[in-house]
Image (cartoon, rainbow, N blue to C red):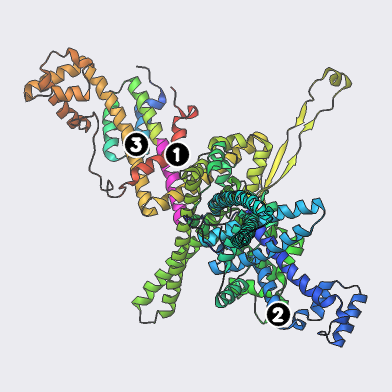
Amino acid sequence: MPTLSIINDESLKGFIQSVGIDEKDKNFLLSKLPEMDFDERKALFETLVKIQILDREEEKALAVVDEYLGK
Amino acid sequence: MPNGEKLNIKTEKIKEGFSVETKKTISSTLTEFKTGIEREAGQKLLTDYEKNNDIPQGTKEKISQLKKEKKDDGTIFKKIDGWGLLGEEGKRNERIAQVSEMASKIDIDKLSPQAKKLILGNLNSEAKYLNLLHKEAKDAEKKRELESRINSLKEARKELAGNIAGEDFKKTEEEITKKVTDEKRGLEEEISAKKISITNKEKEFREMAKKPKRTGDEEVKLAKMRNELENLRENVRKNKDKLDQTNVSTVLEEKFQEIEVLSEKDLKEAEDEILKKRPPEGPPLEEKEKKFQPVKVEQESPWVAFRDDEEFLGKWARVTEVSSDTRNTTDVFLKKGIEDVKFDFASVWAKKHKTEIKDKTGFDPEKVDKKTLTGIVEAMKGFKELKENSDYAKYSEKIDDLAALRAGWTTEGVRHNVAIGTLNEFHYREEKLNKQLEGREEELKAARKKLAELRKGSASYDGMKEVYDKATKDARDLQAELKSLSSVMKEITTATTGRDLTKEAYNSQMLTMEDMAKNLGTDSGRESYMRKLGLSWEVTPAKLAKQSMFDRIRGKEPRIVREKTTTIYDKDSNEVGVYKDDDLEKFLFEKFRDDITGEFIGAEMKEIATSPEKAKEGIKELYRTMKKDLVRDFAENKLKKELKGPKALERIRELSKEKGINCRDAIDATLGRETAYKDLTCNLENDAEAIIKDTKRIWGVDISRDRFGEYVEANPLTPEVIKGNMSWLVYLIKMIFGTFLTSEKNKINF
């Protein structure tokens, strides 16, 4: 199975660990990783990128609230 | 119509508020009336003064001297204390002139009925004078001019008398016209009947008079006939006179005189009331009317969007009724606006004349309150400078604009630009009050903290409590004013368009990212926004390569050697950066986006979330859910894929045998009839339940609900924390970032 370096086990494991989801979801994704085919890995990568974007947005939204609170 | 007979006219409620036209007529007539009184008094003293025995010799000499100095009669009258010389009558006339002058300057809407009666009396006197002038005038043009003035005055008196008597004088006049016409017809009929009777009697009388010899009885009869004839002729004459006198104007005049009647006591009270009233701010009505057109609507207000809105204008044009409550509240706020501008001016003026104020009044202008400072500046004739010194033009123009707006609310139908101008003003007032409120809330927070500390210890906290109470009161007052302001803005838009436009206006202001992107594409749009941000800039124009004559002839575009750049400086003149047009556009758009989201979140949080802390927890929860949804979608797709494969079917069969449970409905509801399961050869009822259990065990996903994947874990933050705020948060996030996730540039393509 052709595998790109960004969607191999190691890269995806690191990516899953870095995003802001709860441990249960992380463990679920990590457990399913070995049996994922190329398309599923692509889909997972896409999902993780979206989650990362949400992480950044959350950070920004909270910063605005902090600013409002005068912190 | 017989004299004194009152017309029985059905009274109708008269609309409150006089038209601007009427106010103008009343004001100018009262001024003329006052001038007339003074002129008459002047004539009495200054014409043939040498022969007037009531004037002391010394005064006569003074008059003579002043006349030689070519002083006008008004000045001479004042210098010799003319009113005093005219005795009791003079004093009375002086007061009438003073009252009339003051009444010409004040808002008649605000006067009591008895003060209005007094004004009607003055108008009646002036009307009589004008009628007399009209009668005596020989020049046709003069007559026409007087007729026009008499007619305007008549209309104004009708409105005023109607307002006092609670009658609609247009209807009254119609009724009078009808009655007068009927009565005239009756009189005419009576006259013609009497004329026939006279003709017959005369014939009979002539016949009898022709007889050469008449008996005694015939002589008596003839004498009686003569008397009868005389009576008939007299009767016809009287009826003719009555016919001449019976006209609408006369009856209407009688009505006005009836309404005008005031007892001595009421008259005195009415005069005092008028003399004590303060005239309204700003220029007189006529000037207000002229100055009205250029009422400014500042660019940044949300109401600008409605300035050229044809729909708004169209609806507006039909509006004639705005409640007196709305008018009054609007007037109160506009008046406050004028007071604030006056105070702003007073502060600037006082700063310039600090030493002078201290020397003359002993007050330190920096340590006195708003009202006192304005009073001091007023007493020191500072406000004279407001009108005369062009340095203060911005304050005086603002006052004029606000005064024009006030005048705009006194008309029967309120004009579109008055409403927009007013809403615009109120928008800025809201902003100002909100800032003040923030300050008070900060104070309150600090005071609350300090108070809590003091309460723990033994020290007295009376002083602190005072501070706390004052801040509480101030905050409450500001909140009440803001509430009232917001409510009157809603009323204005609802009264004029039938719907509350305030939300639309503010939303249109908040959601203009696209418009802003367009605006920033032009030089003027970028400059306007930079101005708003308080930035300054310098433009270095593009440098073009020199063209050869040949290129010029061919019309070839010159080559750009160096592109146009703009250097931006902040408020403290620090350089922010040097930008080409495209970069500047991006930079400004980012700024706008940050501004709008920041302001919006702040405003929404205050409005909806019970506290910013809770809103923060709500945001976290929202993102947690969104991220969980993404994981769930991924899991769902993977599960579907697995369940489509032959291995999955095998597993399902095994599980179904082991458990032996019914699950057809669950499969229908979750995966649908048209899925790969339609060809499942095992016992579906058993299989699906097995799938449910299995998926729960393997995937951590509970599909026992109606919708697949709708798994919800008990979360301590939901729903207690978010309560009803989730919908807002979703909206908020979509508003801010929605376009980001769905925009083409952010899509991830593999």
Secondary structure of the residue carrying numbered label 3: helix
Label at residue B735: 1
- Disc on the earlier residue, 1 or 2: 2
Asked whether residue B392 is drawn in magenta, I would say: no
Horizontal side of residue B134 vs B603, given as left or right: right
Q: Nearer the viewer, mark 1 or mark 3?
A: 1
Q: In which quarter of the image is the N terminus of chain B?
A: bottom right
Q: Can residue B656 be seen in this view?
A: yes
Q: Mark 2 points at which residue?
A: B89
Quarter residue B214 falls in: bottom right
Q: Measure the C-alpha gap from mark 1 to mark 2.
A: 78 Å
Q: Mark 3 points at which residue?
A: B627
Quarter residue B641 falls in: top left
- Disc on the earlier residue, 2 or 3: 2
Horizontal side of residue B535 vs A9, given as left or right: right
Label at residue A26: none
Q: Which of B670 and B7 is in front in this view?
A: B7
From the top left corner, tell me how far across and down residue B55 is, in percent.
82, 84
The answer to whether tags 2 and 3 share a subunit is yes
Q: In this view, does B689 lie above or below B91?
A: above
Q: Can residue B400 be seen in this view?
A: no
Asked whether residue A66 is drawn in magenta, I would say: yes
Q: Measure the C-alpha gap from mark 1 to mark 3.
A: 18 Å
Q: Which chain carries label 1?
A: B
Q: Bounds of the magenta span?
A: A52-71
Dot 3 alpha-carbon crowd within 10 angstroms: few under 14, some 14 to 19, many 20 or more: many
- Disc on the earlier residue, 1 or 3: 3
Q: Quadrant of the C terminus of chain B?
A: top left
From the top left corner, tell me how far across and down residue B544 is, in percent.
80, 30
Q: In this view, does B747 lie above or below B415?
A: above
Secondary structure of the residue carrying numbered label 1: helix
